[in-house]
Image: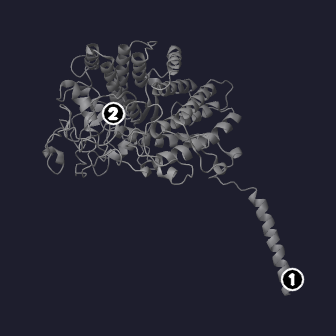
Amino acid sequence: MKCKQIIFGVLLLALISGCDKKLDSLLVNPNNPATETADVDLYLNQVQLGFTGFYTAASDFGGQLARQQEWYGPLYANAYSPNTFDGMWTTAYTSIIKNADALIPLAQQQKKFIQSGIARTIKAYVLGTLVDDFGDVPFSEANLGAGNTNPKIDGGASVYTAVHVLLDSAIADFSKTGVGPRPTNDLFYGGVAANWIRAAKSLKLKFYMQARLVDNTVAAKITTLLTENNLINTEAQDFTFKYGSNLTAPDSRHPHYASNYTAGGQANDFISNWFMWQVVAEKSGGSVSTLDPRRRFYFYRQRTNFADVNVVTASCSVQSYPAHYPAGTPFCLVGQGYWGRDHGDNSGIPPDGPLRTAWGIYPAGGDFDANQGTSVTLSRGGRGAGIDPIWLSSFTFFLTAEAALKLNITTQGTPRSLLDKGIRASMAKVLAFPATTGVTVPTTFIPPASGSGSVDNYVNTVLMAYDNATTDDQRLNIIMKEYHIALWGNGVEPYNNYRRTGKPDNMQPAVNTPNPGLFMRSYFYPAVYVNRNLNAPTQKNPGTAANKVFWDNNPDNFIK
């Protein structure tokens, strides 16, 4: 009997084992599909959504150092730590590049060329931005899986070459005929290939201009692009990511709306005092005026005066003007309730959440400033239906103005005429934006056709300053300052521009010390890379002269 039981058990085990083997071949893990069963459009979702997270991180870090947002300092060498950049790095390699690499060959097989073109374009932007922020980064050996778990770094210049190859391949994809099903989930251009071609070529212009200091071949390439003139030149062609207004399941709001318009009435962000001063006060001799029509769109003031200023809410208000500040530099308070924070202020966070100036209707989908003077709450203004301004037509005009001035490429016009176009394109984008979120600007706050507060008045003021400039350095400063203002919501480009051109000049110094160390010309390598990769280079000190990216050949003390 016992022998029969043993034999039966062995047979049962064999039967179960055989069934397991047969069933195993039928199992598909939906969270880890095989490449041959994967869905191109689901991969595309991952690439696009990962891209928005990557862009937000890169934009915020750049915006902090370029005096758009608050940088806490006080020293460049220790303001950030390696793990600060872990999320941005991981998103780039595991969410975007990995999924793009899986998507592209599959899309090619299925003739879904628009999808593969989108993946190539986004991958190119991400790789180029990694170089711009970190310097030399893994590329040729990256994302090989078990084939290489310790990828080495590639030189930034060689990665830039790969970026242009990717963009050229994307343009070729977008130009193909006989394509398979167009994507129904293109979150940027709705599957319109012509707009993607313009975006890819505009990014080529961006990366060529970025390398103009070290590559004497880019002038001819830029001339070709501008002669062809198939770039982002109108608002309808802008490369933006559009957020929604859902509060939960999922939270689709602009990240800076979510952090500023809270149930408790506490704005959690600080906007740079210098940036607000540049918009609302600088051109009027230091006092707040209605000169720049964008100010009420960019910034929402929770208070329209400084009645709440005291030693607790703003300790700097009882401190002396910093001795190392150049005359005329704004300090502590801008005026008329514009409440931000000075560059490098690492003092304690005061109880001023209900007082801080918050992100406005543009680009975060916040509230329009009509002198309400009330604290932020949930569901105010555009309810978060903002945008990421990744590349706008105004950016094309400002960058082309730089090319005209510094490389003498006047295919699209003179530096002055392109400066004019850039400002007007920015104004048109910003002033029309509330309507896209369902917000109506009160009639009394619509900029007039002429006079104080009008677009024409602002443009004429800038052009008069340009005409009165006596050197190209002064002219470049005017172009890059207007570009800087138009870039609100995009911190990627002002960080690049500042390292490439040193403009705008005379930006607010670090408030707590006259010597914060050398400006951060690149970031720490992320801890997840240095600590886990046997071939990673020695961690760098971003506050030293050795940490410039390949296209930055400017002097060590070029910027502060």
Where residue 66 sits, quadrant-wise, is top left
User: How many numbered markers are drawn?
Assistant: 2
Res 365 seen here: no
Mark toward the start of the polypeptide (2 vs 1): 1
Residue reaching furthest to the bottom? 1
Looking at the image, residue 442 sits to the left or right of residue 526; the answer is: left
| Residue nearest the viewer, comparing 88 with 538 | 538
Position above or below: 323 against 466: below
Badge 2: few (under 14), some or many (20 or more) residues near its Cα, within 10 Å?
A: many
Where residue 274 sits, quadrant-wise, is top left
| Residue nearest the viewer, comparing 181 with 57 | 57
Identify residue type, mark 2: Ile
Position above or below: 75 against 489: below
Question: What is the secondary structure assignment of the residue under circle 1?
Answer: helix
For mark 1, what is the residue? 4
Question: What is the secondary structure assignment of the residue under circle 2?
Answer: loop
For mark 2, what is the residue? 559
Looking at the image, residue 43 sits to the left or right of residue 291; the answer is: right
Q: Quadrant of the N terminus?
A: bottom right
Where residue 253 sits, quadrant-wise, is top left
Image x and y of residue 116, in percent:
62, 34
| Residue nearest the viewer, comparing 453 with 510 | 510
